[in-house]
Amino acid sequence: MMKPGGPFKMPPPRLPGGTGQSAVPQPADRPGLPISQRSRIPAFEVMRITDRVAQRRADGHDVVSLCAGEPSARPAPGTLKPAGYTGPLGTAPLREAIAGHYRDWYGVELDPATVAVTTGSSGAFQLVFLAAFDPGDRVALVSPGYPAYRNILTALGVSVVEIPVGPETRYQPTPALLDAAAEAHGPLAGLVVASPANPTGTMLGRAELAALSEWCSVRGVRLISDEIYHGITFADGGDHAAGGAGAGADSDRRGVTVRELDPEAVVINSFSKYWGMTGWRLGWAILPHSLVAPLEALASNFALSPPAPAQELALSAFTEESYAQRDAVVEGFARARQLILDAAPQLDWGVAAPSDGAFYYYSELGPQLARFGDSIEYARALLEGADVAVVPGVDFDPLAGQRAVRLSYAAGESAVAEALDRIIRFQR
Ligand SMILES: Cc1ncc(COP(=O)(O)O)c(C=O)c1O
């Protein structure tokens, strides 16, 4: 077994209680002024590995990174010119263009005043969580799931109710799981869902999303739907990718928006993934009317306005030419995904989530655990020994994630082919 040593240790400090997550230094460790309780949340392991990848590349290593969920093909940047603040919820033309996107893709009519442009979907999460929840409220989400939901909510003093999910429910919540969570923890104020999800890529079909939305409306629970991976879906992603058995409408092909099902739900989305504009830091929320004024109050204090140059450039995201270019990029993801699905038997890992959409493959390590112990050690050994970066599942699921890894095939076909080759040789 290749297991070279090296100065790099993953992960750094663990939270008390042995959750397997890395932690920011605790207030007691630091001299001087205290650090807030709400900042005691784990760092994002993906970004830590990304940093290590950069170090190894600087040292001359040819690293293949299947680590960050970042499409490499980006539109050309515009020219630099001074730009002023815009309205706190974005420019009118962009809010109208986003409303137009909902008409084109989903056949949904939106009042542009309910569109809030934000600094990435990350900015939307902060504002929406602040506007919708008070400290001590209970908000449910699934594990494995995107860690920032859990960590932002925790930082805001909201009580996170984690619902462990697996292959039985395609890694998505169900009304029965929500009943059990509310029974065990008390009434919920909110539910966060994602379809396609990170890290699993699994999708909620129309029927499943409608059942969750019904469960939430009957109980006065705010449903927040992260739709950032809409548009990155695959023809063979199963019924779920097409909106559920029987639904089959062409408009469901890109993902089903909760906006169609529940006017009180919040949609969150972004230019980062389908459009590959991660660094422009631009996203949006579609709000119920009652949340528009609170969000505007918060946004105008927290960020003043979303970035003006990015908003101007983003207008060109909605042209026919842009959609065609981005759909071609998605076809590239589909080919990279197929390489992984074809190589799965040779990888000799365990159960994998069905990768309906997004650009992630999340799999148990199965037999590899006997050799490497856990996913953290596996990812460390693979990076140091074969120069392939993958993410240990602990970012997404502090407990069961010790047995799983996530591959991002956003890196593209040739990087994925090379990485698979190296992984198979490394494991021999
Ligand atoms: C599910 C999900 N939501 C939100 C984000 C945040 O993206 P951004 O802030 O760039 O819009 C990510 C980034 O990876 C993600 O995977």
Image (spheres, helix red, strand yellow):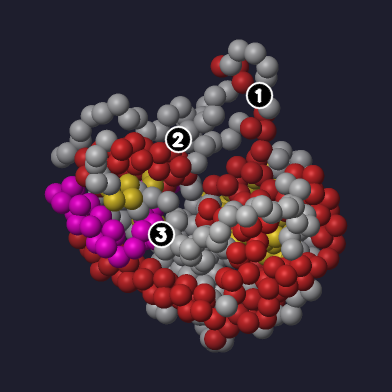
Q: CA distance from mark 3 to mark 1?
A: 37 Å
Label 1: state its secondary structure: loop
**Mark closest to the chain's N terminus, 1 or 2:** 2
Between residues 243 and 233, which one lies in front from this camera angle?
Answer: 233
Q: Quadrant of the N terminus?
A: top left
Q: Identity of the amino acid at label 1?
A: Ile
Q: Identity of the amino acid at label 3?
A: Ser
Question: In the rendered structure, which segment of residues is drawn in magenta?
Answer: 400-428
**Mark closest to the chain's N terminus, 3 or 1:** 1
Label 3: state its secondary structure: loop
Whether pointer 1 and pointer 2 mark residues with C-beta atoms closer than 8 Å, the reply is no
Residue 106 position, x and y percent, is: 63, 80
What is the residue that sits farthest to the top in this orientation? 31
Q: Which residue is mark 3?
A: 72
Residue 350 position, x and y percent, is: 31, 56
* Mark linked to residue 20: 2
Residue at horizontal 62 percent and vertical 51 percent from the top: 122
Residue at horizontal 63 percent and vertical 82 percent from the top: 104
Whether residue 249 is situated above or below residue 192 in the rendered picture:
below
Q: Where is residue 371, by image quadrant? A: top left
**Mark closest to the chain's N terminus, 3 or 2:** 2
Q: Which residue is mark 1?
A: 35
Q: CA distance from mark 3 to mark 2?
A: 30 Å
Whether pointer 3 and pointer 2 mark residues with C-beta atoms closer than 8 Å, the reply is no
| Badge 2: residue crowd in 10 Å (few <14, some 14–19, many ≥20) | many
Label 2: state its secondary structure: loop
Q: Identity of the amino acid at label 2?
A: Gly
Residue 296 position, x and y percent, is: 81, 54
Q: Where is residue 20, by image quadrant? A: top left
Mark 1 C-beta to ligand 1 under 8 Å:
no
